Amino acid sequence: MKIAVDVAGVLLDNFITFIQIYNEKYNTSYSKEDIKYWEFFEELNLTIEEFLNLFYKTFENPAKIPFIDAEAPMYLKKLNQMHEIYLLSALDLKYKEIMKKQLEFYHVVRGIHYKDMIIVPETPYDIKLSHYFKIYIDDNPHLVEPIKKLKDRYLLLYNQPWNQDASCSNNAIRVSNWREIYQTIISL
């Protein structure tokens, strides 16, 4: 089975680092839990370009981006032995190598934990669905409704503060950690 795994918000917790950078720049005290919507940058009075410039600064120091779940590498490795795991990330292409290095910092490497990495543009938000995978593991709430129309595919929506309004049912399943992801995939 072909499985797509998002990176930011599913493997790497870039948003904790993003909020730290934002707070330092604008002298605020937001936390990750304050991010309630996918387009939260609008609430912070940022344009998409300003948001992306700050977001990409999160990759400057690998040690500052926490890993989302310490068990993720173990489960990725197990899944990659049984299925074809691809990292599918919406990202500016010039950050692909930096992201690979960031993942290697956490011992997530191509060939062991995933087959390959695919980079797509940041918008439109559902562009990832133009690549065929049986299962998508992502934190993007804009994938929930489109996936429901694709009865032969599944979305495992990684629980985050910005996707709480997404209504998961049928082939859109909310998950909260990598153990749940692994068990859900095994049960499918």
Image (spheres, helix red, strand yellow):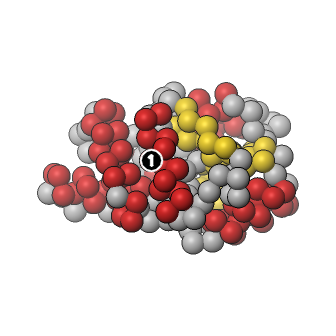
On screen, residue 65 above or below 170: below
Q: Residue shown at 78%/44% (left/top)?
A: 2
Amino acid tagged 1: Ile
Question: Residue 132 falls in which quadrant of the image?
Answer: top right
The residue carrying mark 1 is 98
Q: Is residue 35 visible?
A: no
How busy is the neighbourhood of tag 1: few (under 14 within 10 Å), some, or many (20 plus)? some
Question: Residue 143 falls in which quadrant of the image?
Answer: top right
Left or right position of 153 against 106: right
Extreme residue in the bottom direction? 70
Q: Position of residue 121 (x, y in %)?
A: 50, 30
Q: Position of residue 144 (x, y in %)?
A: 63, 41
Question: Residue 27 falls in which quadrant of the image?
Answer: bottom left
Q: Tell me the element at label 1.
A: helix
Q: Position of residue 185 (x, y in %)?
A: 79, 57
User: What count of labels does the image hold?
Assistant: 1
Q: Residue shown at 28%/60% (left/top)?
A: 20
Q: Residue shown at 64%/65% (left/top)?
A: 73
Q: Is residue 121 visible?
A: yes
Left or right position of 154 against 62: right
Viewer-side residue, 177 vs 60: 60
On screen, residue 184 above or below 166: below
Left or right position of 53 against 146: left
Viewer-side residue, 63 vs 11: 63
Viewer-side residue, 148 vs 114: 114
Q: Residue shown at 35%/46% (left/top)?
A: 55
On screen, residue 186 above or below 132: below
On screen, residue 110 above or below 176: above
Q: Position of residue 78 (x, y in %)?
A: 77, 64
Quadrant of image for the C terminus: bottom right
